[in-house]
Image: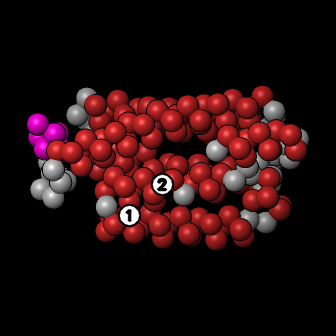
Amino acid sequence: MLKDILPEISEIDDDEILSLRLAIGNYSTLIGAGISIAGGTLYYIFEAKAAGVLWIAFAAILITGRWLFKNQKLSFHGWVYWSTLPLLGASLISIPLLGGLNHSNAVIIWAFMAPMLNLTMLGVRESQNFFIAYFVSLIIAAMIPSQMVVQPFLPDSVERLLFFSI
């Protein structure tokens, strides 16, 4: 039954592993969308409006991807990529919007979920490019000059709250 839904990975997996991969995807979507909406709302309230809108949009992307997959308009691989590629991008874009790497509430750590989700949902071989993309994003984030910072720094108490919400 699950092998009919996920034919592209069913050759190597049994139904129990397929069920586990689906559960990981479902819970990741639910938790990721919830955290993105909560964090995005806090960013928006505390005057980091661009970052707030970005993370709320990311939540919408997650929810849309899950809906497309559930309605069989997106393959399992497509759903995983749909969910994880924007996570890397949103994390990298957030850094200058939030005041640079030191003030970005560790969104680069949040971005690490992209290769980890690919690893758990698709396997080692398919996740290698995501690990490379993550490390390239980390290097780019570290090199973003302070002149590219477009938002004022958030108050320390808000930064701590958002850091621990990750």
On screen, residue 98 above or below 69? below
**Above or below for 62 versus 17:** above
Q: Which quadrant holds the C terminus?
A: top right
Disc number placed over residue 127 in the picture, else none: 1
Q: Nearer the viewer, residue 42 or 27?
A: 27
Q: Which amino acid does label 2 sit on?
A: Ala
Magenta span covers which residues? 1-6
- Examine the residues drawn in magenta and state their main secondary structure: helix
**Residue 57: where, in percent of width, then height?**
56, 35
Residue at left 17%, top 44%? 15
Judge whether 109 appears above or below 15 on screen.
below
Image quadrant holding the N terminus, namely top left
**Could you tell me the amino acid type at mark 1?**
Ser
* Left or right of 79 in this view: 39: right
For the question of whether residue 88 can be seen, the reply is no
Inspect the magenta stretch and tell me whether residue 5 lies in it. Answer: yes
**Real-space CA distance between mark 1 and mark 2, rounded to the nearest whole angstrom:** 9 Å
Circle 2 packing at 10 Å, graded few (<14), some (14-19), many (20+), is many
Between residue 165 and residue 45, name the one nearer to us: 165
What residue do we see at 51% from left, 53% from top? Answer: 113
Q: Residue 114 carries which label?
A: 2
Classed neighbour count for the residue bearing mark 1: other residues with Cα under 10 Å, few (<14), some (14–19), many (≥20): some
Q: What is the secondary structure assignment of the residue under circle 1?
A: helix
Residue 26: in sight, yes or no?
yes
- Residue at image x 81%, y 33%? 46
Residue at the (13%, 44%) spot, across then down? 3
Q: What element carries label 2?
A: helix
- Horizontal and vertical percent for residue 148? 78, 58
Earlier-in-chain disc, 1 versus 2: 2
Left/right of residue 128 with respect to residue 111 in the rendered view: left
